[in-house]
Image (cartoon, rainbow, N blue to C red):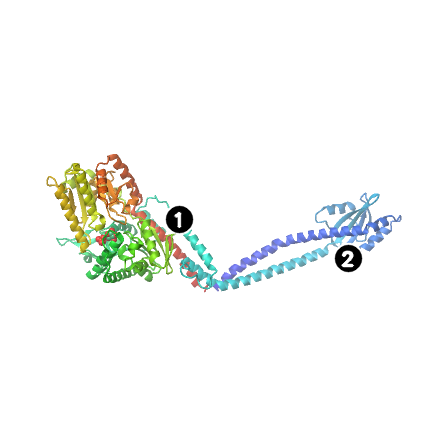
Amino acid sequence: MRWIKLQLRFLVPLVAVLALVAWLALPVLDRLTLRWFARDLNLRGALVANTLADSVSEALADPRGRRLPALFGRVVQDERLVAIGWCSPKGELLVRTPLFPQWLNCEMAEQATQERSQQLSIEGGPVHVSMHAMTAETGPVGQLVLLHDLSFIERRSQDTRNYLIALLAGLGVLIGLVTMAVAQLSWRGWMRGTRALLRGEGILTPPVAGAPELEPLAADLRARLRDLEDEYRRSRPQDAVWDAPQLQSLLRTQLRGDQVIVVSNREPYLHERGEDGQIVVRRPASGLVTAVEPVMRACSGTWIAHGSGSADRAVVDRNDRVSLPPGQDEYRLRRLWLTPEEEQGYYYGFANEGLWPLCHVAHVRPVFRESDWQCYREVNQRFADAVVSEARSDDPIVLVQDYHFALLPAMVRRRLPRATILTFWHIPWPNSESFGICPWRTELLEGLLGSTIVGFHTPYHCKNFLDAVDRYLEARIEHEHSTVSYRGEQSLVQSYPISIAWPSPEAVAAMPSPAECRRRIGAELDIPPDHRLAVGVDRFDYTKGILERLHAVERLLEKHPRWRDHFTFVQVAAPTRAVLEEYQAFQQRIEALARRINQRFGAGGRDPVRLLARHHEHDAVNRLFRAADVCLVTSLHDGMNLVSKEFVAARDDEQGVLVLSRFAGAARDLPEALVVNPYHVEEVADALHQALTMPVGEQRERMAHLRSTVREANVYRWAGRMLTDAARWRLRERVSLRVQRQHEGGWD
Ligand code: G6P
């Protein structure tokens, strides 16, 4: 039925068009035939006149004037010639044959010949009038008036009309039949082809069988779509200031309120049991949490993470869920519990002894154990199952965080093929050579390519990732569009530099002034007011360059004795992954070095290096940032490093100097910092000295630039850009699905 209706939709307009053509063409055709015949009759008339010329001259010589009527009487025997008249040179009608109308004189005949149609109506029907002058040696002798029958023209014109109508009708029927047959035969192939090309198939896989004619069209269409996407991406204003409401509106409008599920290993809040037995809530030291938590507050949704706090189980409901932030209930956390063996193999083992050193290239050898890998796979599967069970529809937006879940994207993709999976790799991606030492490099890449979008902090990390895909997988990479097609699925690989949420005016107003912060820190740590203060805030991790930083402090004190007893360096080092030997050894080395420096340069019972190896809450860190003259960020390798951005955000007084490692992703975003090579102790010591002696005006100028960058390139923009790209992707998927549904609804 539906098929017939669609065919009628085509045939009715076709018939209408043909009828219109006929209606417009027939009068034009009539006029044309008349003009052709008139021209023929004029020629015929001229021929008759020429033929009669001699006979007429002779007949005129007859003094009785009888020969001319007799001659004309013979001539009008011709079936086409109705009547003949003879006009004298003065315009008098001297002779006329019987059917020549009584009312027609020479003047009227002359007028009729001037008209375009040369037509007159007489008793027997329409006639064509033509006049032909005749001359003798003496000059003009008169004019022959010939009236030709026109009724045969009407008859012929009617015949032509009938033929034309029959021809158009026949043509219409033929076109209709051919079209219906072609549509019927090729619709199936076309539908399959359209669906496939919208899915992006035919790049690696051969084009849809039976529709090879679609391949050029598919390629064109795909190229056009990608060009449009690239154009769109380039045209987006980069400097627009994003905030939480803007992100919410993006979710409502472009993503139509789709469910957001975040997956990370580290949870945003830990519930711990204090010494007094009371439960306390703690924010973990994690750049990932710093960035993603404000986004989650804006988006609501569900965050799935490992429940690692000692009192985590005590606060969840029977589905292991808890609303967060405490007391504000803006999103919910679903906690997953890991056995000590799982935690050892997946988290400490494969993630932190294998992938972490592999990706950071910080000269710590990665360790790859088969048993860790098994654990990693199993835990990834457990988290993937949790994503599926938390999903309320078959196409949620899943934000996968970091190197703990390289396999999860493909696992979710298998169960929820229509999910939009955005995976963000928060740490660097090494060059393909270094990456290649991982025994499971292929599996890791395949797992990540289950994502719709794979995001990194910098274009350089994207390039390294694409190089690895190129080297270790049979995938097709389109560098121009930054896409990878692997086994019929396509992923976008893009850089999205992460950031922090810019503090609200209320939060800034609630902070103590920098002078007050300096006074408090001085009192807490016994730092005299005339000391210059440098700070470092990190996890106790070998990638952070804490050792190199301490060497630089030592070198500063060696090179510039003026700073002895006039300078204090405070290093906050939050304990992390302390179960691992590498981390324990690292901590011991730092402590030993700090002791040595303090022994060398301590004066008046005061240590120039203060090592605070414990967790600090956000407010305490903020006070330290506001009190400091210098912040040292000297990572040996870092995806981004958000400490640098938090320091900048804390300095609304536009004072303080940031010394920043060129091997942190943040160095790209913050060029107004003093950018250093952390391995070069002398250079860092000089930068530290430069920072301590930098004039207030220069500090203000640099800090003002840094602050405007971080305010604009904040974490809502990071999330907004990724979600906008995802929205485009989903739109494309939905169009594809609609085509598929239409196809299944009766076209097959
Ligand atoms: C880095 C990683 C995060 C991790 C954080 C803290 O920033 O990218 O995924 O959460 O370190 O490490 P931890 O092992 O304590 O979670």
Residue at the spot of label 1: 232
As helix, strand or loop, the secondary structure at mark 1 comes to helix
Spot occupied by residue 557 in the image (x, y as percentages of width and height): 17, 40
Q: Quadrant of residue 170?
A: bottom right
Q: Residue furthest right?
A: 63
Q: Select label 1 or label 2 by which is in front.
A: 1
Q: Which mark is residue 100?
A: none
Spot occupied by residue 224 in the image (x, y as percentages of width and height): 43, 52
Residue at the spot of label 2: 79
Q: Name the residue type under label 2.
A: Glu
User: Which is more toward the observer, 630 or 518?
Assistant: 630
Is 577 on the left or on the right of 154, as rendered?
Answer: left
Figure label count: 2
**Residue 285 is at least partly visible in this image:** no
As helix, strand or loop, the secondary structure at mark 2 comes to loop
**Residue in view at x 81 percent, y 54 percent:** 75
Q: Quadrant of residue 387?
A: bottom left
Q: Residues within 10 Å of mark 1 (few under 14, many from 20)?
A: few
Callout 1: CB less than 8 Å from ligand 1: no
Q: Residue furthest left?
A: 605
Task: Please state, as top left, top right, bottom left or bottom right, where the C terminus lies in the image.
Answer: bottom left
Q: Name the residue type under label 1.
A: Tyr
**Residue 459 is at least partly visible in this image:** yes
